[in-house]
Amino acid sequence: MKKSFLVLFFKKELLSSFAAHLTKRLASSVALALCGVCLAWARDVALDAHLLAPEPTPVVLDRDGAFITQAGHVTAGARVAYGYWIVEPPARVVAATLALEDHRFWLHPGVDPLAILRALAMRLSGGTSSGASTIAMQVARMQHPRPRTLWAKMVETGVAVAITTRYGHQAILAQYLRLAPYGDSSHGIGHAAWWYFGRPAADLDWAQAALLAAVPQSPSWLALHHANPRTLLRARAALTRIAHAGDAEAGFAETMLADTQPLPRPRRPVFTQLVARLEARARALPRNNVPIDHATLDLRLQTTLSALLGRQMRDWRNFGAQQAALMVVQKGTGAVLACIGSVPGGPGAKYDFASTDRSPGSALKPFLYALALDRNLIAPDGILLDQPEQAFGIANADHEFLGPVLPRQALANSRNVPAAALLRRLTLDASFNFLRVLGLHDLNVPASHFGLGMAIGAVPTRLDRLLRAYGALANDGTWQDLLWFREQQPSAPRQVFSVPAARLVTRFLSDPMARLPSFQRYGSSEYPLAVALKTGTSQGYRDAWTVAWSDRFLVGAWVGRPDAAPMAQVSGARSAAALVQGVLLGLHAIGRADLLAGDFLAPSGRVQTELCARTGRPGACANRQPEFVTMAATTRATETQAHLAIIQPPTGTHVWRNPELPDKLNRLAFRAAVTPAVPQITWLVDDAPAATTPPDKPFFWPMLPGRHRFQLRLPLAPDVSAPVTLSVD
């Protein structure tokens, strides 16, 4: 019996000891878990206990104040717009906000114990739940959104106390008014005041302030554009509380609530590509706490031109065209007045073809001519050859040749063969680099990659870049970037052409007579005012271009297909030129005809005369062209009885003999220009007579290795031509 008692006693002691040990271990585990929870809570609070705000949202208006877009942030698939930082919150907004959201804001440390007890009591009693979130707690939640859990509420509570202690009540209130949602994706009182009432937050009256303060409780339902009657009830409650606190003016404002209406919601334009381009540029503008950016665009013009482009496209689609782009730029300032990147509803409508690289066809030729004029490789009274011997594998669009032509005719007729010969004289590298200087490309490939094809559109470029480069021709050789915003800091202008070269090329391109015979008169390239224009058509009719400028505007257009497939002979002259003509005539409100085509400023230091198109000299001639030449050239023409010139090949030519050909086939053709007409000329090779031929017949010289000098002389007369030198290897 005694033994059984002892065994039982020891068993109870062991069980008691084990239970005490287990309890102690459990208490330690619970304590450790609580410490871990507290540490995790303290960590989350510490991470969130600071004030931050997203970048303010640029709001973009057109030049007349019409809403275009706001470059909002994208959150959870929705666009969110934020206002600018509020340093001193407006008193009326503060009073209305605190009356509805946290009327003991100045008394508690970020958490309102009375509100928490009230909410808990109402929940336990089964009544309607009452919110206990203070202004500081809402700031914590807006800065770091979390799922609505007990843990999130605990963290928000800790953060609210921490940021209030760290920054003070005034800073917390200002932060709330920067972040609070006011419906329609509008955040922050600065943005909401402009969005709904078109005024700064400091200028809101009592009724407007109360209506806005009512929205954050449920912004998706209470936004002012929704006309929810609950918004009016909450605003009236705010004004009543403020009036009871002693502000009589707020009491009077209650009667104004029903008549206080927000502005109509701004409509975003349908120009998707343009909006995206403006938003990207608006974000890059320098900020000086100004919420609104004014684009240089004119939305009314944009809408009008979009309709015009749509009508034209319906006709072009019958010939295989599918898309088009159009731009209008103000001459002198470079301000973009309209930019249509594509036609809605067609293939590729989502793409911006105004900023898409395509082959420009002949649209780059004017820049080569201007460069050659500046480098004295050509002169207005010089002769260029449109002949098979100059082709070097390049063909004219009509597969014909015009023979000797003035630079004015060669460019106005858009002849490919003289342009390719000119490119050879300029050199591929110099021309390619110059196109880069003009901003037409930013390619990092050697010029030889494109070869002579650069003269006819091998280097891809974009419509916006093309208009910027043509602006240099239109503005006396001064290059400047396009201007998209009034607030944009313009780039420093650069002189890329001389004034005479820019004005000469402009004159070349504004002369309808010079376009004959390649382009008909009185078509889409002729105007009742001074307009210079250049068309371009890429190989296979894949791209059609026209750029034109008057004394006030530059207009450019592209027509083509998104897949770069050929069209049915849709050239620049047959499509884009007609569109540009309609745009320019509309911009100038043409009913007047007081300006004549080609009536641009004349190049200084030159005199106007008429030259023979085949020789570049005054005198009797069936085809005479007006041109501006230097006084020295006029004097030489007057003093010289006869003009002799070797017009093929150009001086400095380097040729190679083909050792596999017979000697009689290794020969080079020389051609001459002589005025007045004479029966015969003598060819001098290395100062020795080599042959006598009629002036209109070629002289075939058997190529001999070395460097040689060639001249012309009239029989029994002292007149000789300028020498032409060439090398043979």
Image: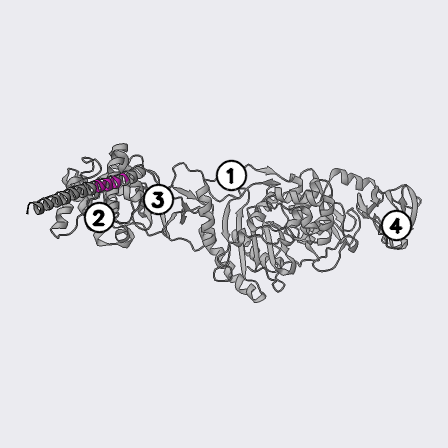
Q: Tell me the kind of residue under disc 4.
A: Trp
Estimate the x, y position of residue 263 in percent, counting from the top left.
Answer: 31, 50
Span colored in magenta = 28-39
Q: Distance between the residues labelled 4 and 1?
A: 57 Å
Q: Tell me the kind of residue under disc 2.
A: Leu
> How many neighbours does mark 1 have within 10 angstroms: few (below 14), some (14-19), or many (20 or more)?
some
Q: Which of 256 and 354 is in front in this view?
A: 354
Q: Are marks 2 and 3 in contact (CB under 8 Å)?
A: no
Q: Name the residue under label 2.
A: 257
Model colouring = one colour
Q: Tell me the kind of residue under disc 3.
A: Tyr
Q: Distance between the residues labelled 2 and 3?
A: 26 Å
> What residue do we see at 76% from left, 40% from top?
633
**Mark identifier at residue 490:** 1
Q: Name the residue under label 3.
A: 82
At mark 4, the secondary structure is strand
Q: Distance between the residues labelled 1 and 2?
A: 46 Å
